[in-house]
Image (spheres, grey):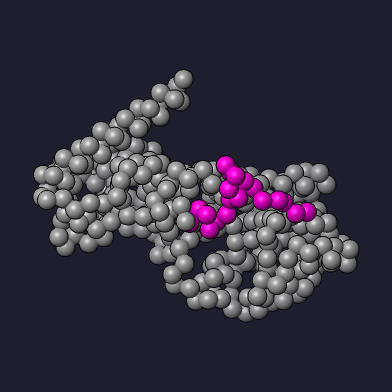
């Protein structure tokens, strides 16, 4: 995948077929748009180009420190590449850029610079100053801009229209199974392994304490989860706790993974955690012994989960 980091880096492509958006999460609806863009490029013997923006527009327009993102720019790049995007243009989103009117963006960027032959947009696509640009606007300017406009309808899963908002809501409630269904892949979080209180080690369940990479990354609801963890390009099964561990006073908030069948020193390593299934909420227990007993139950549940998963995959 060729990446252009800014309009000044863009190099002319043959018969560009363009789609634009923030693509937060790159969920199944976004993936339908990507695949339609690739098909249109194949139809006209052209080249697919995806245009996205960073940072997220809400962070710039609303100075929104409370926004929680489904994907960082590095995660989006990885997913775009996995989904077969050929060319990616990342436009830095600034306050000045946010004030550009739709007709200016279309004329100066899409028509004059990119020279798009086809534009592919989602059913709810909005762009330009105050999000005033829309499919109908693009359709009205189709002939003068010398491009064809293609609209991709909403994508439904189990009678629910997939959207970034629905993915966020699922994660806020801890429903990672539903979030993964909407995404079409496992929701993940990356970070560096740092030293913690080593409580897990003392009670027989050592954990990797992870410092999250990105301050705006959305974390699922506090609780206990089953996960995969990737360490040094190798995937392991794991059991994850997010939260304050209320049984232990002054422990503070943490993001810790007990990696199954693993006994290596990985302090300082960058790792990725993929969420699979939520086990339970955090609870406060009478003492450490009760906590240890519950963790043992969680461990057995996790082992049974992976055993069932392996059995299904082998059948």
Position in image of residue 245 (x %, y %): 22, 55
Position in image of residue 230 (x %, y %): 38, 43
> Is 192 in front, or is 139?
139
Quarter of the image for residue 122 reads bottom right
Q: Does residue 76 appear anywhere in the picture?
A: no
Quarter of the image for residue 253 reads bottom left
| For residue 232, side relative to residue 22 (left or right) | left
Position in image of residue 264 (x %, y %): 25, 41
| For residue 36, side relative to residue 54 (left or right) | right
The residue at the point 59 percent across, 57 percent down is 23
> Is 157 in front, or is 113?
157
> Is 200 in front, or is 158?
158
The residue at the point 30 percent across, 46 percent down is 280
Q: Is residue 58 above or below residue 86?
A: below
Q: Is residue 119 above or below residue 6?
A: above
Number of numbered callouts drawn: 0
| For residue 205, side relative to residue 238 (left or right) | left
On whether residue 292 falls in the magenta region, the answer is no
In the image, farthest residue toward the front: 159
The residue at the point 11 percent across, 51 percent down is 286
Position in image of residue 296 (x %, y %): 20, 37
The residue at the point 16 percent across, 63 percent down is 250
Q: Is residue 60 above or below residue 312?
A: below
Residue numbers of the magenta segment:
150-168
């Amino acid at each position: 995948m060729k990446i252009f980091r800014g309009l000044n880096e863009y190099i002319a492509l043959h018969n560009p077929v363009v789609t634009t958006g923030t693509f937060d999460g790159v969920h199944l609806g976004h993936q339908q748009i990507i695949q339609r863009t690739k098909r249109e490029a194949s139809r006209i013997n052209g080249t697919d180009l995806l245009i996205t923006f960073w940072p997220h527009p809400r962070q710039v327009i609303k100075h929104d420190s409370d926004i929680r993102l489904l994907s960082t720019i590095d995660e989006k790049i990885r997913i775009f590449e996995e989904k077969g995007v050929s060319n990616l243009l990342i436009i830095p989103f600034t306050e000045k850029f946010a004030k550009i009117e739709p007709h200016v963006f279309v004329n100066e960027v899409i028509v004059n610079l990119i020279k798009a032959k086809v534009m592919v947009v989602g059913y709810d696509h909005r762009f330009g100053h105050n999000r005033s640009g829309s499919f109908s606007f693009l359709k009205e300017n189709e002939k003068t801009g010398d491009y064809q406009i293609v609209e991709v309808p909403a994508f439904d899963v189990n009678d629910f229209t997939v959207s970034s908002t629905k993915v966020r809501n699922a994660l806020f409630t801890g429903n990672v199974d539903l979030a993964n269904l909407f995404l079409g892949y496992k929701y993940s979080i990356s970070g560096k392994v740092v030293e913690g209180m080593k409580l897990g080690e003392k009670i027989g369940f050592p954990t990797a304490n992870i410092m999250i990479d990105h301050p705006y990354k959305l974390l699922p609801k506090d609780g206990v989860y089953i996960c995969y963890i990737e360490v040094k390009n190798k995937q392991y099964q794991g059991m994850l706790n997010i939260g304050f561990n209320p049984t232990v006073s002054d422990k503070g908030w943490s993001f810790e993974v007990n990696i199954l069948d693993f006994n290596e020193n990985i302090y300082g390593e960058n790792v990725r955690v993929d969420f699979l299934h939520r086990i339970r909420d955090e609870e406060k227990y009478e003492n450490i012994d009760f906590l240890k007993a519950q963790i043992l139950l969680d461990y057995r549940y996790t082992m049974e989960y992976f055993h069932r998963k392996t059995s299904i995959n082998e059948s």
